[in-house]
Amino acid sequence: MDGIEEEEEDEGRNWEGGQGRAKRRRSNSSQGWDDGNKKWEKGKARKHKKGKVKGVEKVGKRKTKKEKLLEEMEKHEEGEEGVGGELEERVGKGSGDGKGIKEEEVDEKGEEGLGLGEILSAGIGQEVKEEDEGKGDVPGKEKKRKNKKKKPEGETKEEKSAEEETPGKTGKRKSKEGGEEKKGEEKNNKKTKKQKEEEKEAETKWKWWEEEKKEDGVKWMQLEHRGPYFVPPYEPLPEDVQFYYDGKPLKLSLATEEIATFYAKMLDHEYTTKEIFQNNFFHDWRKEMTSEEQELIKDLDKCDFREIHKYFVEKNEARKALPKEEKQKLKEEADKIQEEYGYCILDGHREKIGNFKTEPPGLFRGRGEHPKMGMLKKRIMPEDVVINCSRDSKIPEPPEGHRWKEVRFDNTVTWLASWTENIQNTLKYIMLNPSSKLKGEKDWQKYEVARRLKDVVHEIRAQYRKDWKSKEIKKRQRAVALYFIDKLALRAGNEKEEGETADTVGCCSLRVEHIQLHPQLDGQEHVVEFDFLGKDSIRYYNKVSVERPVFKNLQLFMKNKDPTDDLFDQLTTHFLNKHLQDLMDGLTAKVFRTYNASITLQEQLKALTNPEDNVAGKLLSYNRANRAVAILCNHQRSIPKTFAKSMQFLQEKIDAKKKQVEEAQEEVKKAEDEFEDTKDAKAEANVERKKKLLKRLEEQLARLNVQATDKEENKQIALGTSKLNYLDPRISVAW
């Protein structure tokens, strides 16, 4: 595929692809209405062909005659003698040799195609009108055209009623085509509006990649924003919603009540069944209680949150059931907040902010079996927040009655605001959106390093294979660790965040207890069984067959060690990364993870994509390729609590669609039987219509089935993390 391999010749090509496409759009949109009218006329002609199966050849002939008429009209207007009279003769009476347009074909019956008036208005009329405007009227021509639109006086009422009743007759078609013409014009107008919006967006898009690079370390020259949007204050529960302790209602203080609502909202969640979650919650909750409440509330098992839980469930349902107008008002309010706080000015350009809201207070969940789950996440106040902006900008004002912790003017960092959260004592940041310049630059650099690794990865692999036999145990450990980082996309380890107390490890910090060696297992030789907690306390469990030298080295590293001893006791990430820097500039253990994720996506897309599939099938192939990456990187998630309900709803839709398909199949069979009996053009058209409906329903059913498969396969896999952080977007664009 093109993603990593072909782009070496022209690095950055895909980053400028958007600009190229924008330029093409601008040139296309300036072509005027000519192309649009041609497309519209073609579409209209196709509709008439579909309307009658018989007479297809005649329609083709009439199109040729229409073109001839146009040529003759143009010649006449240019002053050629003798053409005008001949043209009028043919239009008025038809040519005597029978090769002209038949009178009944042109006007009276029109069963086989367009009447002359319609031909003139739909095709020739438009073009002639344009010519006429520049060259003056052709004497007698307009009069003749008007006369021909009238019905012959001899037409009887019976003929009129027959014409009205028969599908495809001139009268009905005229009104229908009038609507179609109007609809077509509206569509063209709409399309033009969209093109204008795209053109405007392309013109205003900041092509930061075309600008000169700033000096090292400088991220921006100007940064102005409104600061973070703070979560609204807590609203007390209604008087009729009560908390019960030991079976008796108990009125709680405002702070205690707010924390009680955090637990009540999670009653139907698996977290509240875990002992560690319950203990951490109750410990932190008691710290926020008044002394009287502490004396009274001493046992979580005696606390009854059910009435509070019911209140929030009903409130949530009521919000979902709001009328459309009310939902629109709420959306407008949210859009107003987004507009005010969700954008900043960066070096004179308006850029979108990623997470402009502070995290709401609540109970910490963590991932996996995190030891701090259930602890109280406190409300972020302006006094906790450090603001970062440029000196010449308008410094954001804190909410009334508050002040910022600090205001900085640091253009060597990319964050707009920061604070320290109370659970892990780690810094949280407000950053720009992933589509912004700062994130784009960082990602571009990251993926370029990964692409450079592709050129030297074979040499690096040859080197660490050679080091498996080194006389130095330190080099052997480094070589085996690098093999795991490369083959299994393991994190290097030794990357614990400050304040992290969970027993999480990476490759370099593995202990003897985290692996088991099996000379043979499940029909494979030299199997290593991994079982440890990785980043965010996500369990990594894998059985993998390794090369024999790796297996022998692991046996050596584990010899005479206790289960709690380090497997790679002579290895640190610093020593590993220093070695990698010597092999390639900018290379760290982290780059292997990005490289392997991107190359896996590329290979999987190549293997899984069938060009003949419909869009839904291709999307399924893409998600499966993405899932292979997520599995490689161990990006898991717990099954959503609404999963069973949403799958049930989807299955009901599939069952209903199956029923529609069966009914449509019956309709097609009936229509085919009717056509066999009558051999009527109307019956044949009906068969085609029924078949089209059946095909559309079958496509819809196929899409629903693909959706169900995709949903089931991804219930425990998080696709978003790898998509946002590990996959070079140019691979997806190339695909």
Image (spheres, helix red, strand yellow):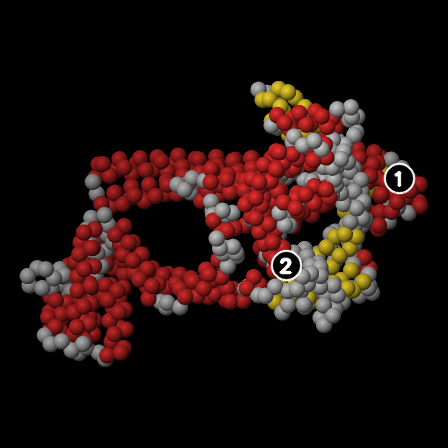
Q: Quadrant of residue 408?
A: bottom right
Q: Quadrant of residue 512?
A: top right
Q: Of the residues shown, which amino acid type is indicated by label 1?
A: Ile
From the viewer's perspective, is residue 694 above or below residue 337? above
Residue depicted at x 93% and y 41% = 295
Residue depicted at x 72% and y 72% = 392
The mark found on residue 198 in the picture is none
Element marked by disc 1? loop
Comes first in the chain, label 2 or label 1: 1
Residue depicted at x 21% and y 39% = 678
The front one of 285 and 199 is: 199
Q: Position of residue 47 (x, y in %)?
A: 29, 54
**Residue 71 placement, left or right of 244:** left
Q: Quadrant of residue 508?
A: top right
The front one of 502 and 176 is: 502
Residue depicted at x 64% and y 20% = 519
Distance from Cα at disc 2 to Cα at disc 1: 50 Å
**Residue 44 placement, left or right of 518:** left
Q: Are marks 2 and 1 in contact (CB under 8 Å)?
A: no
Residue behind mark 1: 297
Q: Position of residue 280 (x, y in %)?
A: 82, 39
> Can residue 107 be seen in this snapshot?
no
From the viewer's perspective, is residue 190 above or below residue 719? below
> Can residue 710 be seen in this snapshot?
yes
Q: Of the residues shown, which amino acid type is indicated by label 2?
A: Leu
**Residue 297 placement, left or right of 667:** right
Task: Using a 10 Å C-alpha cutoff, classify the residue at mark 1 as few (fewer than 14 neighbours), some (14 to 19) or many (20 or more).
Answer: some
Residue behind mark 2: 438
**Residue 276 placement, left or right of 464:** right
From the viewer's perspective, is residue 451 above or below residue 181? above
Q: Position of residue 33 (x, y in %)?
A: 35, 67
